[in-house]
Amino acid sequence: MNAEIFLQVDNYISDFLAPEDKALTDTIKSLNEEGLPQHSVSANQGKFLQVMMIACNAKKVLELGTLGGYSTIWLARALPPDGKLITIEADNHHGAVAWKNIHNAGLSHKVDLRIGKALDILPEIIEQHEEPFDFIFIDADKPPYTEYFNYALQLSRPGTIIVCDNVIREGKVLDENSADEKVQGVQRLNKMLSENENITATILQTVGSKEYDGMAIAVVNRTA
Ligand SMILES: C[S@@+](CC[C@H](N)C(=O)[O-])C[C@H]1O[C@@H](n2cnc3c(N)ncnc32)[C@H](O)[C@@H]1O
């Protein structure tokens, strides 16, 4: 078993079940052209998010960390015609690239892109008394993942699914003495997930076209 077989199987699965169209491949190209990092989810992970959304009948979605809009496009495509998605991005340039890609995918009418730090925007959304979100995808900076998750819980209903990406970090989560603040951020989140009685959660390891990592999946049982 090695990275090569994981990549080949990832391609095998995405050829069957998560083929990319031009809007998605153009989005990936735009990251290189515009100097953004290739940190998008993979096609199979995008499809996984869609499956989770449909499982919880998601009409209202929140995303933290837009980058170039690749995951946003997968998410917005799984919304019903009257569905809405708010996506939060701290970087102005990332936001501008994302908006172009979302527009090219014909999804700008469904997407509300908010530029700013998630820790500033989330309390604003709570103050605005938004209806609860059905599905929340956390994929922004890692150190405040626990704070993001706690805000996400405040914006949830029983049955909301919350997915957090990159919580295994090539296995570095096992290092209790890690000085890496990203590792520490996800360690804190994973511990909290194990202790929080308001959710049912697990973590799936992810391999394939991206580096070895993991996604946490939580279903909200009750709001605090
Ligand atoms: C891993 S990338 C998101 C990838 C995207 N979800 C996708 O799969 O296509 C993380 C993004 O979070 C953004 N980000 C970093 N810190 C942030 C913050 N405090 N608030 C909101 N976004 C932030 C980064 O600028 C970057 O674009």
Image (spheres, grey):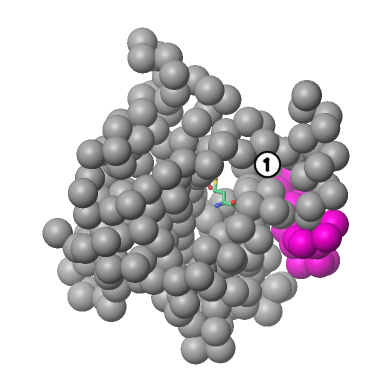
143 sits left or right of 127 in the view? right
Density class for disc 1 (Cα within 10 Å; few <14, some 14-19, many ≥20) is: some
* Of residues 124 and 204, the one drawn nearer to the viewer in this rendering: 204
Find residue 43 and report its image quarter.
Answer: bottom right
Magenta region includes residue 109: no
The residue depicted at 53 percent of the width and 55 percent of the height is 66
The amino acid type, in three-letter code, at marker 1 is Gln
Q: Position of residue 61 (x, y in %)?
A: 44, 69
Magenta region, residue range: 15-34
Q: Main secondary structure of the magenta part?
A: helix
Farthest top residue? 177
The tally of labels here is 1
10 sits left or right of 106 in the view? right
Q: Position of residue 111 (x, y in %)?
A: 51, 74
Find residue 144 and report its image quarter.
Answer: top left
132 sits left or right of 57 in the view? left
User: Can see residue 40?
Assistant: yes
User: Can see residue 98?
Assistant: no
Instruction: List the residue tagged with mark 1.
Output: 38
The residue depicted at 55 percent of the width and 84 percent of the height is 80
Q: Position of residue 104 (x, y in %)?
A: 71, 73
The residue depicted at 78 percent of the width and 24 percent of the height is 1
* Of residues 28 and 3, the one drawn nearer to the viewer in this rendering: 3
* Of residues 139 and 156, the one drawn nearer to the viewer in this rendering: 156
Q: Secondary structure at mark 1?
A: loop
Q: Quadrant of the C terminus?
A: bottom left
